[in-house]
Image (spheres, helix red, strand yellow):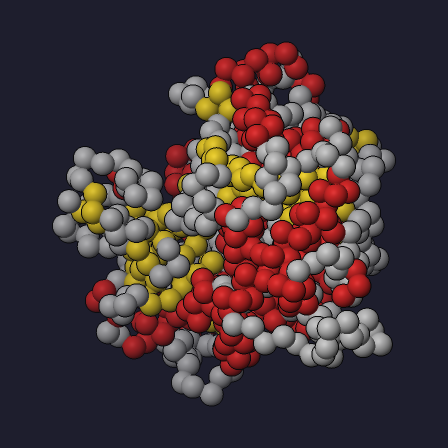
Amino acid sequence: MRPCPQCQTPCDETHKFCPSCGFPIGKVAVSPDDPLLGRTLPGGYVILELVGIGGMGRVYRAEQTNLGRTVAVKIIHPHLVGEENAAARFITEARAASRLNHPNSVGVIDFGKTSDGQLYLVMEFLRGSDLARVAYDEGPLPFRRIVDVLRQVLAALFEAHALEIIHRDLKPENIILEPTRSGGDFVKVVDFGLAKMRVEVASPSITSPGIVCGTPEYMSPEQGRGDPLDGQSDLYSVGVILYQLLTGRLPFEGDSPTQVVLMHLTQVPKDPRSIAPDRRIPDPIAIVCLRSLSKDPRDRFRGADQFSDALADALAEVEGERASLRSVATSSIKCSICGALNAMAQKFCGECGTPLMTGGSRPASSGGSLAPMAMDDERTLPGLAGRGQPPQRGGLKLPLPLLGREDDLAWLDERRADARSTLGGARIVGDPGIGKSRVLREFLTSCGDAGDIVVEAGPDPAWAEVGYYALRRTIRALASLPDNGGVARDWTAATAEARRGLADIFSQRLPDKPGELNANGTGGRHAVLSPDDRRFAAAEALRWSIVRASERARGRRVIIAVDDLHHVDGASRNAFADAVGEPPLVPSLMVVTYAPGFDPGFPASAAARVLTGVPVHLITKLFTETGTKGVPSLSGARAISPLYLDQLLRFTREQGQGAPTRLADIIALRVERLPADARRLLQAIAVLGDDATGETTLPLLPNEIDIVEALTLLSRAGMVDETDGRLRTTHPLMREVVLATIPAAVRRELHSAAAEVSENNGAPPEVLALHAYYAHNAFQALILLERVSGLAAARGDLFGSILALRR
């Protein structure tokens, strides 16, 4: 027997999945030589297998269990843990790298220390090959490909240097290439293990002058001398890499590392054209290379942006183009996603619908494209109405139609038919992306067409489990109350308990004496109720509102739908469960959806249905009927999650083949490859929740961001929707994955800005506590979480109270 890494339930050695929680325990390797395999780190990262060993630590493939997402975990070598300088340098790596938020920089999403003192950091998992391996396997690379790769490297460095972060160890092994649909490369710069922030601190420097760190073959002269460094040192290393890719040799080679360093300090590199005459290295590119290797930093390029532009202009000159690569050609522009040529007047690619961003002056490309992003001084968010989906090949439109759910809808119709004289309960259970919300919406549409009164509720927009949010919304809609819940005269025929519940839910005051009202129509005092009494009163208020709705329905049914119940606040959940447990005697039905493993507290009489994937034969039939071509292979699968199929099709159209087999990994990969502006806007929307607007989003974004193009791209990629001026991610799982991919320091900054915006807008304490918690504002979070815990306990929400205290 061995314990499950997720729930600790004893599992048999032959089990492939945990019988208690379903964790794929069979994937966890067990090795007596590596005790880290199978271990769960703080944050729920289960280590699965060793994938590499470096100078600072060991790199493992791991799973983020709450999302089922693949990540990489780097753990410092045990023999270095006791060395103060090494441990401090590792923490510096984590803090520096987690500030980087560029598509071409590897994202550090978490870091910390295990219970036994082992330091670790969690990064996005890369599936490509390093530049050294690619150059070795493929031989001399074409000049255009060299320029493309290095411009993406320089794009990553441009952001890092703007944050005063220096890589200090750039070399081909730290540049990862992933193939793109157009046949190019998507570049990731990894291992800021020797990074140093230039900001001076009072504590002694762990990479102080006189201490030489890095790889000798790629060191700048100033790095070899142990001088204080700036971004020029990284640009010199890029020049060494350029020299090596052009000639197949390093500019300086010696018998020892010391000799190599001295050569960097004293010798002038030979002209690459004379080293590799057979390569016919173009003069413009050779001149750029030699300038980047100047001994004096002042003789090199001023920054990564100038270096990138010089490479682009050199290649444009070589290829005989009149315009630089920033505009590609005067008559056409190449799509960065599918490679198709489009007229310069087009705003979107006619082949795949990607926005064609022309003009501007970005320092370098990202995402494998040589065309830079557009700049726009207008920081406004136009509506998305009329933009629609991008042109799609083969006739199959996204989002996909509802498929293979006839039996599930028939089951819901039966539950509706059974609800003739009392409130019935129906539960739809399924994994994220299985289609619970889609089935529920289809059912509610049919109920509305039949004349039923339909009321929908769900989590609060900030996903902070704001107390009574879902219950308030439900009661208002059922009883036709104003937003503030109305006054006592609006609560016709409500019992004393229901009135207490309504007053509590809507923060109203009861009359001091029976029939006595204040000028505002409410009353002069709060009723003092125990948590159990408040819970009972809230359920009574809900029952009263259901009866009120039934009176308006005139014999038809009242349908209450609560989507994503597992994200609804505990006080509202209690009221819903209590109403179904002791139902009002009117024809009505409450349908809820939630994820497996969640206990809604409903009685056993409330029927449940577990949704499964769509059968592959139905998907194949749909492809055939619509004439869809170039679809990904679904061989070996019996059923597919609808959201997985949607994301798989989008990934295939954007990136080509090689999609991950897991839903969260596909979403993460799509997010990680977004252009920088779109990526930052998506992150801001995810942090704010489902009620983000242009006004609330702007404080979370850099001033230079091109919001118009970013929002257009996100809309056409099916990642962001707009309703009544509110921006939101298209699926809760999309939001969760986006949040999980935000680098740690960046996420803290975003939540800190969101906390200020929320406070200015008078947000509830639950929202403020959530942002303070993730912003690592410990003192404020402590005060707010204690308050949230007290409020939850007073409402009878024991689980919510405990969760706040645990945080």
- Examine the image and state in which quarter residue 337 appears: top right
Image x and y of residue 308, in percent:
64, 53
Q: Residue at x 62, y 63 (%)?
A: 497
In the rendered image, is residue 644 in sight?
Answer: no
In the picture, measured across the screen, residue 583 lies left or right of residue 517, that is left
Q: Residue at x 45, y 62 (%)?
A: 799
Image quarter in which the C terminus is found: bottom left
The image shows residue 494, relative to residue 439, as above or below, that is below
In the picture, measured across the screen, residue 551 lies left or right of residue 664, that is right
Which residue is nearer to you in this view: 130 or 569? 569
In the rendered image, is residue 350 in sight?
Answer: yes
- Examine the image and state in which quarter residue 553 appears: top right
Which residue is nearer to you in this view: 411 or 675? 411
The image shows residue 355, relative to residue 376, as above or below, that is above
Q: Which residue lies furthest to the bottom in this view?
A: 202
The count of marks equals: 0
Which residue is nearer to you in this view: 141 or 548? 548
Image x and y of residue 442, in percent:
65, 30
Q: Which residue is drawn at 82% across and 41% down?
A: 385
Image quarter in which the N terminus is found: top left
Image x and y of residue 340, in percent:
70, 28
In the picture, measured across the screen, residue 75 lies left or right of residue 449, that is left
Which residue is nearer to you in this view: 670 or 726? 726
Q: Which residue is drawn at 56% across and 39% down?
A: 424
Image x and y of residue 77, in percent:
26, 62
